[in-house]
Amino acid sequence: MKTKTLKKNKVNVITLGCSKNLFDSEITMAQLKANGFEVEHEAQTDDSEIVIINTCGFIDNAKQESIDTILRYAEAKKEGLVDKLYVTGCLSERYKDSLQKEITEVDAYFGTRELPKLLKTLKADYKHELIGERIITTPSHYAYLKISEGCDRPCAFCAIPLMRGNHISVPIEELVKQAKSLAKQGVKELILIAQELTFYGLDIYKERKLSPLLDALCEVEGIEWIRLHYAYPTGFPMEVIETMKNQPKICNYLDIPLQHASDNMLKAMRRGTTREKTTQLIKEIRAIIPNIAIRTTFIVGFPGETKDDIEEMKAWIQEMQFERLGVFTYSHEEDTYAFLLDDNVSEEEKERRAEEVMEVQQSISLSLNEQKVGKTYKVLFDRKEGGYFVGRTEFDSPEVDNEVLVDASAYFVRIGDFAHVKITSAGDFDLYGEVI
């Protein structure tokens, strides 16, 4: 028996996982709205007739969060707080058969490329004229732009190709159209995302086309910052760095996951490169753009990793002085190449190694931040929090990187606007400043 009145045709879309999932949810919401549904993203009130959970299946923690969320709404459905419950996304793509058997309260499960099927289940039409249209869930001044789907890389640890399929690029003209639409909505910063940015264009143009895409996006009026996420280091196309140097709209920022520093581990991970080659790549990039901020991620606890491998990683991080760095603990994923190996590093040891690596990065980040004191930077302000306006320089991406805090009792800035800020003090991962 229902315990409260549910709003008919109201849909609550819940997104778990990465920015690529968020992008997919925004597309889904636009299609639903065009079909007459009232749509909310992660609604604060439980009065939606329909709940759609867009799941993540990347690593153990993300999978558990997705399962917990499904179970929560399955229970809500039992209690009459939800009428229909649908699950989509990566976890659903990968474990659909098991989920259908284990959590029967869900009305239907859909994979990562089954939006038309989901809409049909809701008696809605997939409107082709809306391709690329989205309901933005980020602050209105920035948005993610997914330039391709899937991945063709053979990394031993990664289950993404199992969930997202092979690499498929979106044509340049379509991406420019999307960027123009976003700019009309007030978006000033485009964050380009993909499983692998540097493969862009290989499938449809038979050659890498990231540089021409960037040139085309820089022509879009209203877009002031363009940021690059998730570029693979092996075979990196250096013309992209030249384009970044020559195009003032492109942030001097590159997210390039490197995953390890030990040659033994890089080989075991099937990364197709060596520490020496990666060192040379980073040096070449910095030679062209000396003030670039390089963000990277590492994996600790891969099967066979030794303490010597970790010491090598720490020493290399100290040598390279990465501006931004994150660490994942290895997750033993079914059907990946590495699943054949013995997951012989304990979870406790993985966490300890991750903490060791982040301690190294913490001191690097503090040192680099302290060098910014007294300098002035262009800052895009994202929000007001507590007694501060909180923003970012071009060297920082939202939610994962450093932030600039300005005392709201002394200065006023509008959210979504740029301002020039003189840095007055620095912490490990934050800067403090005054508006000029």
Image: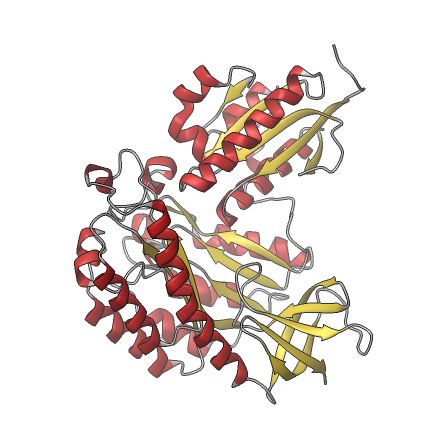
> Is residue 192 visible to the viewer in this orientation of the structure?
yes
User: Who's the residue at 31% across and 74% down the image?
Assistant: 282
Q: Residue 62 location in percent, x, y? A: 47, 41
Q: Is residue 8 above or below residue 396?
A: above
User: Who's the residue at 68% across and 21% down the image?
Assistant: 82
Q: Is residue 346 above or below residue 107?
A: below
* Viewer-nearest residue: 345 or 383: 345
Left or right for 422, reference 258: right
Q: Residue furthest bottom?
A: 374
User: Who's the residue at 62% across and 25% down the image?
Assistant: 73
Left or right for 122, reference 358: right
Q: How is the image coloured?
A: secondary structure
Q: Is residue 333 above or below residue 316?
A: above
> Is residue 197 visible to the viewer in this orientation of the structure?
no
Left or right for 411, reference 163: right
Viewport quadrant of the N terminus: top right
Viewport quadrant of the C terminus: bottom right
User: Who's the residue at 63% across and 64% down the image?
Assistant: 188
Q: Is residue 300 above or below residue 222?
A: above
Q: Residue 165 location in percent, x, y? A: 34, 38
* Viewer-nearest residue: 393 or 239: 393
